[in-house]
Image: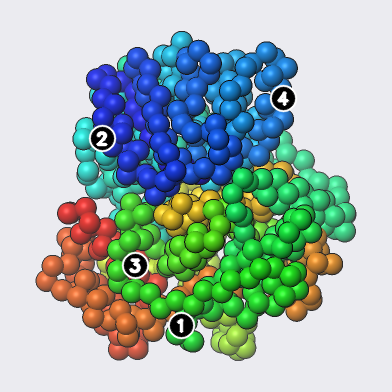
Amino acid sequence: MCGIAGVTGFPLDEATVLDQVGVLRHRGPDSFGVHRGTAGAVAQSRLAVIDLVTGDPPIATGDGSIGVAFNGEIYNFRALQRELRERGHDLKTDGDTEVIAHLAEYLEPEALCLRLDGMFAFALWDEPRQRLVLGRDRLGKKPLYYWQGPGGVLVFGSEIKAVLADPRVPRRLAPQAVDAYLAFGYVPTPGTFFEGIRSVPPGHVLVAGAGQSAAVRPYWVPQAPGIGGVRRSTLRYEEAGAEVRRLLCDAVDKRLMADVPLGAFLSGGVDSSAVVALMARLSPRPVRTFTIGFEDSEGFDERPYARQVSQMFGTEHTEFVVNPDKAELIERLVWHHDQPFGDSSALPTFLLSELTRRHVTVALSGDGGDELFGGYERFAAGLAVNALRGVPSLTGTACTVLNRVPPDLFAGRAGSVRRMLDRADAGLPGALLAWVSYLSPEWRERLRPGRSHWGEEDYERIWAETSGAAPLDRLLLLNLRSYLLDDLLPKADRMSMAHGLELRSPLLDDALVDLAFRLAPGAKVRGWSLKRVLKEAVRDLLPHDLLHRRKRGFGVPLDRWFRSDLRLYSEGMLTGSGARVNELLDATAVGALVAEHMAGQANHGHGIWTLLTLEVFLRQEGW
């Protein structure tokens, strides 16, 4: 993993490029370098994971005509090396970055990306063609931002702060960013909070000739049966489980490639436990596993579950128990994200990454199982809403039934279910957004009168583009292109790379993604039975009680923290005389939301976090 940055256009200021890569040293503390052409430069701050001897940047072809800055890992680079040597290419290093430079000599950008199996964001300057090429992996595991100015100038970086390090890039708030953020907890790709700064979409390349406007083109689009000509798998349920197992084993195996210490995050849930179980089978030495709990016994603590799995597979297990300075930590999280971020699970992810990095440089995680195989209760609820649309008095009848359901059925998500039901008559995806949003439509209307539905067009657009697919596949595609892309993956990347820790996700392997969307919906979700085929795939590895234990989120007790440790901080930030959010939101509504929570009249913990990280961001930017 690394940080990359650079520029194309005139004048070419190498000192500014060094400033850009300098602010990314947390992503790559081991070395840095710049490759400069006549009208473009690409730079890299390197975290050394593979090829510790010859892999330092800058990396270029033998004649220096094509230089590459690279962030990520290419798991099939050995096969690509053999292919290149057979074609007569003279490779000087033993790492994966150089293969990109040589492939670019004879492949167009889209074809080049399709040859890469891994997670990546790369930038290459092609001197003969006088062009800059940016490429991003299929799902968007690695970030890549850019700004285009007059005269064909283009500035890019792994993080927004690297783009802003160029003094030509303005710091202006994007007009509709706040509305989208209140709805989602993030600004959907390709937008950002900064006007003019955009994200290269996943599965896309950007090509910018010297002095010319950039062209952003897709090379891969996620598809499912019913759209794009994809055919439904004919595998029976047991056969599908066996194929998932085979591909998952391959995915874990290829991610054990490293010349530095390697371990795994372990929560004791199905996904991370399955990854650790396969690591234990594939690794010649005990696997190193890491988990976290808060010193406050009522806070988040997954240690008992992780300990059980660790003992089962004989791992070298490390437990971290923390009691962080929460206010100071919020400021650090926002700085690393470069934007407000509504998902409070970034906090334990940040701490776990920080402590894990003291022991290893690379860690595998269980991210992706819920996204590919339908592991969230909202998928089952969405299918139910979709099936019941048009039933008279749906909302009232369903809410009456909900009130009679045992309180623990939704594991504390009854409020989300009610919000979904309130919008059920409008159908999906609006009902799904009501479930996942940290602020209800009613509160968004109070905070931004007349603008409460702004930003929702992204959900509607993605939903419309999946017309023809089965309802579950549509829900999974929507989640893949929203929550996974703009919440889960940025959280994993920023919080791990804040400490120079490389995080790999076997369950998001390209081959698994392709198979998962071809499998019959019933193989993934049936009623309230979730992630069925993945559990079938690892049934012989994990005990029954672990496979069927209710999913626990990687969260923190925000409701109580804001009434105790963080009360004075949050009240001062959001309702004090210097609150910046008052310039963007209705101050009376902000005060009412905070007051209701502090009085115990409602649980607005996630809403307060959403507003608080917005406030911190506005203060850090001086807006």
Give the spatial CA distance, label 4 vs label 2. 39 Å
Using the image, tell me which numbered label, if any, was put on residue 82: 4
Give the spatial CA distance, label 1 vs label 4. 51 Å
The residue that label 1 is drawn on is 295
Q: Is residue 492 visible?
A: yes
* Nearest to the observer: residue 607 or residue 621: 621
N-terminal of the pair, mark 2 or mark 1, is 2
| Residue occupying the point 34% across, 73% down | 326
Q: Relative to residue 183, is residue 74 drawn left or right?
A: right
Going by the picture, which residue comes out furthest to the left? 577
Q: Amino acid at mark 4?
A: Arg
Residue 419 in the image: x percent, y percent?
Answer: 48, 72
Q: Relative to residue 306, is residue 121 drawn left or right?
A: left
Query: Is the residue marked by circle 4 packed among few (<14), some (14-19), or many (20+) residues within 10 Å?
Result: some
Q: Quadrant of the C terminus?
A: bottom left
Residue 271 in the image: x percent, y percent?
Answer: 67, 63
Query: Is the residue marked by circle 2 packed among few (<14), some (14-19), or many (20+) residues within 10 Å?
Result: many
Using the image, tell me which numbered label, if any, was put on residue 329: 3
Instruction: Please say if the residues under marks 4 and 3 sit with CB atoms less than 8 Å apart.
Output: no
N-terminal of the pair, mark 3 or mark 2, is 2
Q: In what element is the residue under mark 3?
A: helix
Residue 433 lies, with reference to residue 225, above or below; the image says: below
Q: On the image, which quarter does residue 371 sit in?
A: bottom right
N-terminal of the pair, mark 1 or mark 3, is 1
Residue 375 in the image: x percent, y percent?
Answer: 65, 64
Q: Amino acid at mark 3?
A: Leu
Give the spatial CA distance, label 1 vs label 3. 16 Å
